[in-house]
């Protein structure tokens, strides 16, 4: 598995985590290039369908990034996202699919380093887990 | 406080005692109409019927032992837009619980609706029941047997037939409703119980429709506990068996390999509350080239696509409110255990939020609410 490079699809909210990712770039934080970012206005806009679609179609992991609890620009989007992610993780776990491929992370606009560290750690973890079995299911 | 009455049954005609009570609800204008299953002219099935004329209550089947549609859907159609007059609906326990869930999603309006629940011994598949009638095992003789069995909670069914799987594992044989008709623990050929909730108690007393007393069946709660215990045991066994088969997603797809993705399970489900389902929108009308790209990436793909995502997403949207009626099972042309899947997964998810669907109309479904301090699921401790 030495040359396995995991692919991560990230859904980041505009006001916090996306801006945090931007900051990571402008402040030249180093992090692996395994991540494809999708820019949303709020983590509350993430439906479990997006997450699952990414996992079925080729992602090895999905990162959902939003503002810290209490800081959502739309007040409560991140709390709703958290419930949705918890429900999806619970369902997948019940169906024998590890929840550890789906990450929910609160990263603020000023936490560029936290964003870089999160991606680094996630890539590391996914490398240990190996390719996502879901994306190989021909009959999904 | 709920008010209780014991109603005497004349000449062992339990259904007539109940029909008499329902008639008086119409005649004394407690309600303008009653929704209730009526026997088809062919005798081999039942349909929900909205009855205005008290005389038309003759021939209704209070104990209809099938569930051709989830009546919560019917009640939704009936109540959600401009129902100006009071209507009562005679429903099974799971139909009431589904109606309660739909009320939370603003798809049932309780304002002018009274729910009448009736103890449920279980229901048969519609096709099974039709066959039973052909073989002379349905109709009145079946009802008599079922009522007899409900006294002690020991039901014996015509040989070769069983209740729908969902019913066998349903822990809710009795209802919480505006009016509950009680059969478990009663010698129903002589007496049954009726319990009236707060919404109607006063009116029914004032209009002299029932006289209330505290006398009930002494064995009732014991019988109910026994029935629930048996069904819970069955449920746990089915869950365990199912989880033994569905060890991972590949195993799930193997078990569901005959799913033709017809969406019948979703159409039949009373809980699927979206007015427009994403699976029936352009989002899932993929480009030809897209199919080719998928096939290219995986070498081959099963057609039609999107089976896994269909089941998992339907679950993620509504499994917290699944009341386990099993209408999905009954609707599946491939006889797949959809309800066992939804119930076994749903159990964990519902517990996560200490949520019991159908319990109380005042509660908010987990997908429509949140708490600030809950679910420590943030990932990747750094
Ligand atoms: S009804 Fe059965 S075959 Fe049709 S989509 Fe549902 S599980 Fe698949
Ligand atoms: S998923 Fe099946 S068992 Fe659950 S509410 Fe819908 S139809 Fe009933
Ligand atoms: S705007 Fe960042 S989570 Fe809602």
Image (spheres, coloured by chain):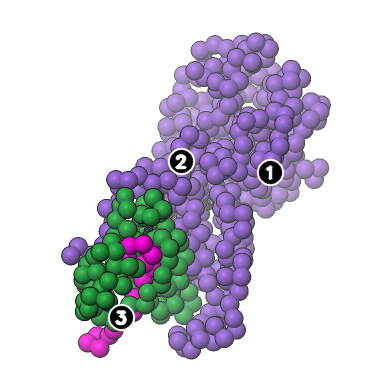
Chain colours: A green, B purple
> Which chain is disc 1 placed on?
B
Query: Which residue is pictured at 70% across the width and 21% down the height?
Result: B30
Residue B23 rendering spot, x and y as whole percentages: 74, 23
Q: For residue A64, what is the image quadrant?
A: bottom left
Structural distance between the alpha carbons of marks 3 and 2: 40 Å
Q: For residue B35, what is the image quadrant?
A: top right
Structural distance between the alpha carbons of marks 3 and 1: 50 Å
Q: Is the residue indicated by label 3 positioned so its CB lies within 8 Å of ligand 3?
A: no
Which of labels 3 and 2 is toward the front?
3
Query: Which residue is pictured at 63% across the width and 23% down the height?
Result: B189
Structural distance between the alpha carbons of marks 2 and 1: 22 Å
Residue at the disc numbered 1: B77
Q: First in sequence: mark 2 or mark 1?
A: 1
* Residue B331 visible at all: no
- Residue stretch rendered in magenta on the structure: A1-17
* Residue B5 visible at all: yes
Query: Which residue is pictured at 42% across the width and 57% down the height?
Result: A44
Residue at the disc numbered 3: A34
Q: Are marks 3 and 1 in contact (CB under 8 Å)?
A: no
Disc 2 secondary structure class: loop
Disc 3 secondary structure class: loop
């Amino acid at each position: 598995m030495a040359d396995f490079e995991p692919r991560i699809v990230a859904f980041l909210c505009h006001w916090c985590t996306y801006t945090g990712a931007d900051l990571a770039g402008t402040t030249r934080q180093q992090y692996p290039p395994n991540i494809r970012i999708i820019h949303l206005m709020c983590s509350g806009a993430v439906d479990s369908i997006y997450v699952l679609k990414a996992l079925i179609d080729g992602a090895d992991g999905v990162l959902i990034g939003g503002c810290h609890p209490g800081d959502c620009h739309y007040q409560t989007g991140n709390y709703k996202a958290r419930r949705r992610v918890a429900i999806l993780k619970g369902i997948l776990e019940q169906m024998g699919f590890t929840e550890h491929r789906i990450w929910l992370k609160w990263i603020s606009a000023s936490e560029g380093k936290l964003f870089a560290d999160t991606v680094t750690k996630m890539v590391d973890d996914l490398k240990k887990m190996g390719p996502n079995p879901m994306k190989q299911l021909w009959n999904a | 406080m709920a008010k209780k009455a014991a109603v005497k049954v004349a000449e062992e005609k339990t259904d007539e005692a109940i029909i008499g009570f329902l008639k008086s609800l119409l005649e004394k204008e407690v309600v303008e109409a009653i929704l209730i299953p009526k026997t088809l002219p062919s005798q081999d099935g039942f349909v929900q019927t909205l009855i205005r004329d008290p005389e038309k209550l003759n021939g209704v089947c209070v104990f209809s032992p099938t569930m051709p549609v989830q009546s919560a859907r019917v009640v939704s159609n009936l109540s959600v837009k401009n129902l100006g007059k009071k209507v009562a609906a005679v429903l099974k326990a799971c139909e009431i619980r589904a109606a309660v869930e739909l009320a939370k999603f603003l798809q049932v309006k309780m304002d002018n609706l009274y729910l009448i629940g009736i103890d449920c011994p279980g229901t048969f598949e519609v096709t099974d029941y039709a066959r039973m009638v052909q073989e002379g095992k349905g109709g009145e003789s079946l009802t008599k047997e079922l009522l007899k069995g409900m006294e002690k909670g020991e039901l014996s069914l015509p040989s070769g037939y069983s209740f729908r799987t969902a019913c066998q594992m349903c822990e809710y044989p009795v209802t919480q409703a505006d009016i509950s008709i009680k059969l478990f623990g009663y010698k129903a050929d002589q007496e049954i119980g009726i319990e009236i909730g707060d919404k109607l108690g006063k009116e029914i007393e004032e209009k002299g429709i029932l006289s209330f007393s505290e006398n009930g069946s002494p064995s009732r709660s014991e019988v109910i506990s026994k029935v629930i215990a048996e069904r819970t045991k069955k449920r746990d066994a089915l869950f365990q068996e199912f989880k033994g088969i569905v060890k991972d997603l590949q195993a799930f797809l193997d078990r569901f390999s005959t799913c033709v993705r017809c969406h019948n399970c979703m159409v039949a489900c009373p809980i699927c509350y979206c007015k427009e389902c994403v699976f029936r929108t352009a989002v899932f009308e993929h480009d030809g080239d897209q199919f080719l790209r998928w096939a290219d990436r995986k070498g081959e793909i099963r057609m039609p696509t999107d089976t896994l995502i269909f089941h998992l997403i339907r679950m993620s949207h509504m499994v917290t409110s699944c009341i386990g009626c099993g209408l999905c099972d009954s609707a599946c042309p491939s006889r797949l255990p959809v309800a066992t899947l939804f119930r076994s997964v749903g159990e964990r998810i519902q517990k996560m939020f200490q949520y019991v669907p159908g319990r109380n109309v005042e509660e908010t479904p987990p997908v429509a609410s949140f708490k600030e301090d809950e679910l420590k699921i943030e990932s990747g401790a750094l």
